[in-house]
Amino acid sequence: MSDSEIVVSGVCSREGEDCYVGDGGTCAEGKDHPTECDCFKVELEENTKSSELKQYGIWWSGNNLGIQDLSRIQARGESRLIGVFGSHDTGKTTLLLIAYLNNIRRGLELTYKFAGSKSLVAWENLSSYLRLDTTKSTFPPHTSRQSDRVPGLLHLSLRDSESNLIDLLLTDAPGEWFTTWSLNSKDPNAGGAPWMATNSDMFIITADCNKLAGENRGKARKELLMLLERLAPFTTDKPTFLIWTKSDELEEKPIPEPIKSAIVAKLSRNIPHARQYEVTIKNPDSVTNLLNDLLLDYESSRQPMIVSEPLVNNSSFMCYRGSYA
């Protein structure tokens, strides 16, 4: 059975700013149909016959979320933004993917249980590189350096032991941002690094064991030390983890003791509350455990809000606090 449908196409004056109705998204003004919005200019209107069900716009596409999507996520409860910092090719994206894949594989066994995602398409596109395939399994491609001032955000919904919903937003940003930002915090090529540092509720800093033990270990050490120093003012009273990635390679090629000692000493001076973890793709639980501990640290670091009632002296009625006060 075919239904007649009016198809309308046009241009929104806010397209590309905070409205994505042209890409199948919803109207930023909340209108059920674009023609009801004053920002939308109709260019073509025609009747068509189609047997397909009517498709409604959605505010998320399944790809990486942007800053306009934050308010939608935060509207249903408190979210946590986890900033993942590290130089180029230190395993940031791989770290995120292991956390995602292990959560959907062992979700019911973990402390924080997988409860969905608004960026499933992005997760699946990236994780396709890591899934077992003897012909093409590999690490995900390098995160491209874009001109955006905000990084791509990967979303995970988890539930704690009391079934409370927790929305996690994890940043997936190119390492070049952080190297540039470490050298000059005002450099426009630092992209979204300043935004991440300012807005993150928790921090993950990646230290590549392979690089720190390789031929270019001096450069890798310098980049990490500069990042720790630049990031230190933003991490005060916020859970911060230094992650030694690719730690499975330490057995064959350990990090020279002077280099590791310098990094640990710098971390102790600049971010004394930071914790250290070793993770490896051979043990996915090592990544999931650090994410669980990061959330537990965040919960324990939160200060309860103290609400004090004002004392009104000029009215006996307003001073009443109940029979048990």
Image (cartoon, rainbow, N blue to C red):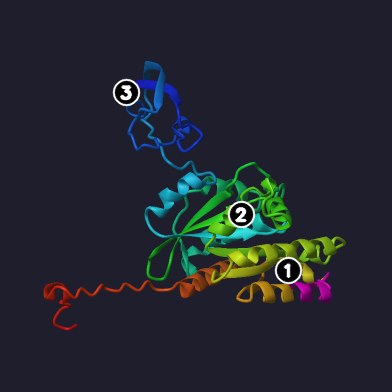
Identity of the residue furthest to the right in this view: 215
The picture quadrant where one finds residue 25 is: top left
Q: Position of residue 285 (x, y in %)?
A: 60, 68
Residue positioned 32% across, 28% down in the render:
36
The first of marks 3 and 2 along the sequence is: 3
The residue that label 2 is drawn on is: 194
Label 2 Cα neighbours within 10 Å, binned few <14 / some 14-19 / many ≥20: some
Tell me if I can see residue 281 in this picture. no
- Does label 1 or label 2 sit earlier along the sequence? 2
Q: Residue at x 49, y 69 (%)?
A: 109
The answer to which of 63 and 44 lies nearer the viewer is 44
- The disc labelled 3 sits on which kind of residue? Met
Residue 282 vertical placement versus 53 (above, below): below
Q: CA distance from mark 3 to mark 2?
A: 55 Å
User: Disc 3 marks which residue?
Assistant: 1
Q: Amino acid at mark 2?
A: Pro
Q: Which residue sits at x=35%, y=74%?
A: 306
Q: Residue 123: x and y, percent?
A: 56, 50
How far across and how far down the image is residue 265, in percent? 73, 76
Residue picked out by circle 1: 247
**Residue 264 appears left or right of 310:** right
Magenta stretch: give its range.
253-263
- Residue at the far left: name it: 317
Type of amino acid at the residue the image marks with label 1: Ser
